[in-house]
Amino acid sequence: MVASQNSKIIEDILKLKKEREAVILAHNYQLGEVQDIADFIGDSLDLSQRAAKTDARVIVFCGVHFMAETASLLCPDKIVLLPDEHAGCPMADMVTAEALRDKKRQFPEASVVCYINTTAEVKAECDICCTSSNALKVVATLPRNKPILFVPDKYLGSYLSKVSGREMLLWPGYCPTHQRIMAKDILSLKEQYPKAKVLVHPECRSEVVVLADEVLSTGGIIKFVKESKAEAFIIGTEIGIIYRLKKENPDKRFIPVSEQAVCPNMKLITLEKILWSLEEMTFQVTVPDAIRDKAQEAVRKMLQLS
């Protein structure tokens, strides 16, 4: 009965998608059913690039609010829909434009870099944006005689500082989902699976990152696994990625560091909500004109490096 119901929903989504001239973008952390219906699946950088290049009239963004907002920044002439208006990002909420302006007054000489996990209002206060997959490349372009104010993820910023050797002023933000990935669990799994490669996201705690064989964005994890000859992988990021990893690599084994590493906001979007979003053309995500140009510039600078 459930399969039959889903088949009808999928049929209706595909019909409406054609009528609306829509494209469906889904993040690697989305539910499996959402990944299956998407035209493109990827990390924040992949999806930003797809949004910037699409000829579709409507973008249905299956992710969280800042991602849909970034798509709206890059495609002001498109209608951008977020199927659940409550799909937010706790990390993005840990920095406000007002608080960032205060910090910039304290460190006027600093280059300001914002992780893509921020609001458009915050992006408008930054020199350049980055994702976890291109952060090192972004940092390398900044003047070496200036410190870098990095917002909002202290763990990604700490990792970048260590790898690049650059001085970083770190905002005290973090991802609650990646906080649940613990070093003790990795050590235990390494004992159980000594030949498995440990792949973790740079949003993880610093003590977790140092235990990894590779520190990668979700897109980087997908690529590494595909190209690796290893047969087993310990995965230190949100567990939604494992659906895609298994689907694309059926002969390989994937062990999540923690079954608790679930982003509840990413899981809010379902097939029913995608259908409803296309039917009602809601929830539309837009960026106020007053901040669009500056925020757009920070994102475009990033994309030019990618």
Image (tube, helix red, strand yellow):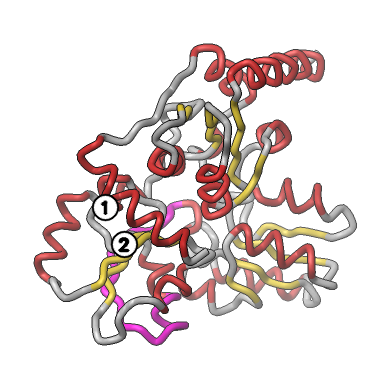
Query: Measuring 32% from the left and 46% from the top, which residue is drawn there?
Result: 119
Magenta highlight on residue 128: no
Whether residue 175 sits left or right of residue 151 in the image: it is: right
Residue 101 point in image, percent of width and height: 14, 57
Residue 213 point in image, percent of width and height: 66, 77
Give the alpha-carbon distance from disc 2 to disc 1, as whole Å: 7 Å
Query: Measuring 79% from the left and 68% from the top, which residue is drawn there?
Result: 227
Can you say whether 136 is above or below 204 in the image?
Answer: below
| Magenta span of residues | 159-176
| CB within 8 Å, label 2 to label 1 | yes
Quadrant for the N terminus, please. Answer: top right
Most foreground residue, 77 or 9: 77
Quarter occupied by residue 32: top right
Can you say whether 234 is above or below 270 in the image?
Answer: below
Whether residue 124 sits left or right of residue 188 in the image: it is: left
Q: Which residue does the numbered mark 2 point to in the structure image?
A: 151
What amino acid does circle 2 point to?
Val
Q: Which residue does the numbered mark 1 point to in the structure image?
A: 95
SS of the residue at dot 1? loop
Mark with earlier residue (2, 1): 1
What amino acid does circle 1 point to?
Val
SS of the residue at dot 2? strand
Camera sees residue 204:
no
Residue 64 point in image, percent of width and height: 47, 39
